[in-house]
Image (spheres, grey):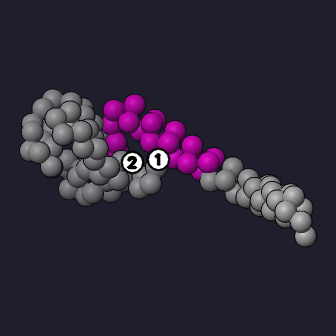
């Protein structure tokens, strides 16, 4: 085969690969978008209900950061000093760990 024929064949095979991979990436994108919207709705509601005891845990209150140990009024999920994002918290009533933001949501 000559050089232009090899280049055309290579580009056509690569294009075919992209066509077959596109539905997979579309499904993965839809799943990630669903997780993102779910996490956004939980965070914007300002409270998380414990699945074990049913206690309503408020997300905005006096919190101490696990990394820098700064104490501030605000979200339990974000530290404005060291910019740490926390994905889990403990229930105020029973102490069970609650995953607020699912792992790998972004």
Distance between the alpha carbons at the discs numbered 1 and 2: 10 Å
Question: Badge 1 local density, few (<14 within 10 Å), some, or many (20+)?
Answer: few
Q: Position of residue 80 (x, y in %)?
A: 20, 33
- Against 20, is 105 above or below? above
Near-viewer residue (66 or 60): 66
Residue identified by numbered label 1 = 106
Near-viewer residue (7 or 50): 7
- Against 81, is 3 above or below? below
Residue 72 in which image quadrant:
top left
Q: From the viewer's perspective, tell me whether residue 6 is left or right of residue 33.
A: right
Q: Is residue 3 magenta?
A: no
For discs 1 and 2, the disc positioned in front in the rendered view: 1
Q: From the viewer's perspective, tell me whether residue 104 is left or right of residue 12.
A: left
Q: Is mark 1 on a helix, strand or loop?
A: loop
Residue displayed at 41% across by 56% down:
103
Near-viewer residue (101 or 80): 80
Q: Where is residue 65 in the image (x, y as percent from the top left)?
A: 15, 44
Q: Does the magenta stretch include residue 47?
A: yes
In this picture, which residue range is highlighted in magenta?
29-50
Main SS of the magenta part reads: helix
The quadrant of the picture occupied by the N terminus is bottom right
Residue 10 in which image quadrant:
bottom right
Residue 46 seen in the figure: yes
Question: Badge 2 local density, few (<14 within 10 Å), some, or many (20+)?
Answer: many
Residue pushed farthest front?
Answer: 2
The dot on residue 78 is none
Q: Position of residue 64 (x, y in %)?
A: 12, 42
Q: Are marks 1 and 2 in contact (CB under 8 Å)?
A: no
The dot on residue 101 is 2
Residue displayed at 33% across by 32% down:
46
Q: What element carries label 2?
A: loop
């Amino acid at each position: 085969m000559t050089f232009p024929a090899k280049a055309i064949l290579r580009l056509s095979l690569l294009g075919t690969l992209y066509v077959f991979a596109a539905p997979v990436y579309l499904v993965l994108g839809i799943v990630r978008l669903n997780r993102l919207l779910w996490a956004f709705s939980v965070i914007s509601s300002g409270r998380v209900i414990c699945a074990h005891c049913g206690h309503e845990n408020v997300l905005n209150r006096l919190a101490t950061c696990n990394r820098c140990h700064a104490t501030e009024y605000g979200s339990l999920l974000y530290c404005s000093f060291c910019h740490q994002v926390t994905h889990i918290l403990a229930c105020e009533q029973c102490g069970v760990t609650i995953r607020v933001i699912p792992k790998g949501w972004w």
